[in-house]
Amino acid sequence: MTEYQAVIGLEVHVQLKTNTKIFCGCSTTFGAEPNSQTCPVCLGLPGALPVLNKKVVEYAIRAGLATNHSIAPRSVFARKNYFYPDLPKGYQISQYELPICLNGHLDIEGEWGTKRIGITRIHMEEDAGKLVHGDVPGLSDGSGVDLNRACTPLLEIVSEPDIRSADEAVAYLKKLHQIVVYLGICDGNMEEGSFRCDANVSVMPVGSDTFGTRTETKNVNSFRFVKQAIEHEIERQIDLIEEGGKVVQETRLFDPASGTTRSMRGKEDAHDYRYFPDPDLVPLVISDDWVEDVRLSLPELPDAKRQRYVQELGLSAADAELLTAARELAEYYEAVLAAGAPAKPAANWVMGEVSRGLNDAGIAIDACPVAPALLAELLGLIDKGTISGKIAKTVFDEMWQSGKNPAAIVEEKGLVQVSDTGEIEKIIDGIIAANLGQVEEYRGGKEKVLGFFVGQVMKASRGKANPAVVNELLLKKLKG
Ligand code: ADP
Ligand code: MG
Ligand code: ZN
């Protein structure tokens, strides 16, 4: 039996988070009344002229630099001709021969180690509108066209056919997703289609250097679906070839309900689109200065951040991964450090109490009621021995509720930790006198009883006794 190797290349569409569309001033807000965000340009009325949105170009440069591309000093918009009812002009403005970003790459980590996936290009283009079927407002039944989305800005990011498995594909997509969200150029919302993927898949016998015929599965909009779609497609193609059939180049659709793909249409070749430079838009010239300005404005990217957390802050790889997963969480953590908190305790609190609180309340980190500086103050109180770690959790809950500063809460509620040996000794003597039986047990070799005494002393001090001091004194006294 022949063994097969899958070959995968991904085209990712990233919807850019600009306020206005790519070639007109209409709003890009999601979910508005159908056709309320349109004008002669995005309606495709004859004679209306497109004007390029500078922000879109800046975002494309950001994406290109963050994924190791060279930025073309001169790029050209082209018309891609095809008919679709939600594409009123009869063509889509895109880039073809001269895209804005070329020759990038991303490194993905996994069971395969670290692997470099080439990125052929990134180009800018406009999105089409949307067809709405069935329950269309104003129509009892039928189909309507909503052009609010027409002309919203997209980046298309095209990978080299370097990916060899569904897991590699998902790792690549997750990394790309994290980067565009970190860059602040995309909201990353996959259900709303802000980040969607076309998966090109082919198979060939292991060891062959000629790729098989590929199929393209369109608009898969979750990581799980991408994995399913690719795995299903690999299996389908292998079965087909084993049965003596041939894979045809075609566009397929993924059906989440069955986890399978089905044929949608024969795949066009580039020449079918009759691409030509759009005469309404002059070539886009980008100066080196602009590129350098954008480079300087880039945030620290997830890979670099993760590495720094491990190497400079001494965090574990797993903690660094967790804290950098979302840029906002990493920024919160860094604000706690900037306010003077030590790295490891701060990491534990952010991943622990803070994350738990956010989870329970169902809110995002930017709505966290405990300001980073106040969390740092709380950690300072623990560090100085003013309160114990246990009491700190009570104080934290109070901070979460009231937003008050920790010192005020400690003062108000009389939570200051007792480290004074005289005071603690007094409590210990009382407890020992009242539990002579247990003292005998301890002295008879039952060391577990120490826990009982610690518990009693902590209880008697209402949690305020310094646990280290309690332990030390108890041991001394119990041993006699
Ligand atoms: P199109 O717009 O026709 O889909 P693109 O060049 O934009 O063409 O994208 C082609 C995608 O298909 C790229 O991601 C590329 O890596 C991938 N690809 C090309 N050939 C193969 C193949 N034989 N098997 C799998 N993927 C392929
Ligand atoms: Mg394609
Ligand atoms: Zn418009």
Image: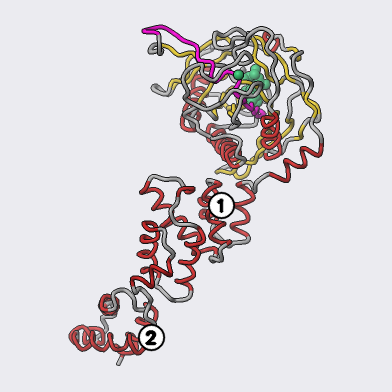
Compare marks 1 and 2 and give the one earlier in the sequence: 1
User: Regarding ligand 2, which quadrant of the image does it lie in?
Assistant: top right
- In the displayed structure, does residue 62 sit left or right of residue 19? right
Residue placed under numbered mark 1 in the picture: 331
Q: Confirm or deny contact between disc 1 and disc 2 (CB under 8 A).
A: no
Residue farthest toward the bottom in the current orientation of the protein: 480
Residue 157 in picture, x, y percent from top left: 64, 29
Residue 255 in the image, given as x and y percentages of width and height:
44, 20
**Which residue was labeled with disc 2?**
420
**How far apart are the alpha carbons under marks 1 and 2?**
39 Å
The kind of residue on which mark 2 rests is Asp
User: In the image, residue 453 lies at what x, y percent?
Assistant: 27, 80
Residues in magenta, as a range:
139-161
Q: Is residue 215 visible?
A: no
When asked about the image quadrant of residue 267, the answer is: top right
Question: Label 1 amino acid?
Answer: Glu
